[in-house]
Image (cartoon, grey):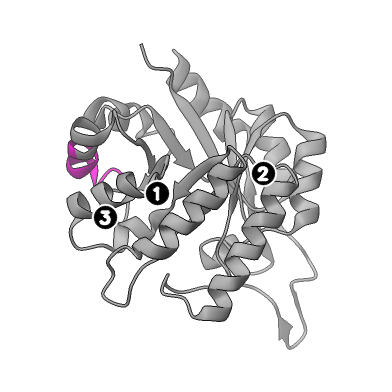
Amino acid sequence: MKIDIFEVCAGSVQDCINAELGGADRVELNSALYLGGLTPSLAMLKLVKEKTSLKVICMNRPRAAGFCYDDVEIETMFKDAEILLENGADGISFGFLNPDATINITHTKKMVELIHRYRKKAVFHRAFDCVSDPYVAIQQLIDCGVDRILTSGLQPTALQGCELLNNLQFKFGERVEILAGSGINVDNIETLRERTGIHQFHGSCKIWKKDPTTTLGNISYAYHEKDDYDCVSTEIVRQIVQLLKR
């Protein structure tokens, strides 16, 4: 019987602490979650490894928008991956696409080889959800040696992508780990598990906190509602984990 795993999408050291308190198995560590998640700092990784016992997958994404990178961005990604792996990352989450949204096999294979030299996990993130043919793409990623794929089934949320997620798990689940993510919450986690056959889930478990210095006078640094920012809720993590474990 396969064990269910819950990974929390974390944007800070405190997020990771909250995730562990809630019973999460693993975190994906990011900066700038409001941009979809960018590469975290080395200090963040080191503190998470000091303050928690969680497995830490580090996002490797040098900028916002898509996943077709120029030479300098690619060089940065490989340098970041090396530094993060040398300092305790348990895996790297990345994605390389060509301009036509097909998998960039050359860079993907090279990144997998780097990660595997450190005996860590190579995770292809939701760049996968941009491809036009998921069956061709997943076979290419398997051939490149990718260990895990984070996907919503090419839909805005995993619940909407249930049918494809189920098909991918059924056809390829013995050769690559499928990690379902996007829009996962207390209300749908059991339905997702039942309808997809997947045993790994990725969620943000987000709540909002106020910072009264966000908007003052004519100056505003808000990116959501006035004066707030997102963070991981220990209680939401706990509720999801309890549903998965029962």
How many marks do you count on the picture?
Answer: 3
**Residue 232 at x, y percent in the picture:** 62, 44
Other-residue count near label 3 (Cα within 10 Å), few / some / many at <14 / 14–19 / ≥20: some
Residue 50 is drawn in which quadrant?
Answer: top right
* Mark 2 element type: loop
Q: Is residue 134 magenta?
A: no
Residue 31 in view = no
Residue 161 in view = yes
Question: In the image, 149: left or right of 59?
Answer: left
Distance from the alpha carbon under mark 3 to that under mark 2: 29 Å
Which residue is at a point 71% across and 58% down the rendered structure image?
Answer: 210
Which residue is at a point 50% across and 56% down the rendered structure image?
Answer: 111
**Of callouts 1 and 2, the N-terminal one:** 2
Distance from the alpha carbon under mark 1 to that under mark 3: 9 Å
Other-residue count near label 1 (Cα within 10 Å), few / some / many at <14 / 14–19 / ≥20: many
Question: In the image, 1: left or right of 244?
Answer: left
Other-residue count near label 2 (Cα within 10 Å), few / some / many at <14 / 14–19 / ≥20: many
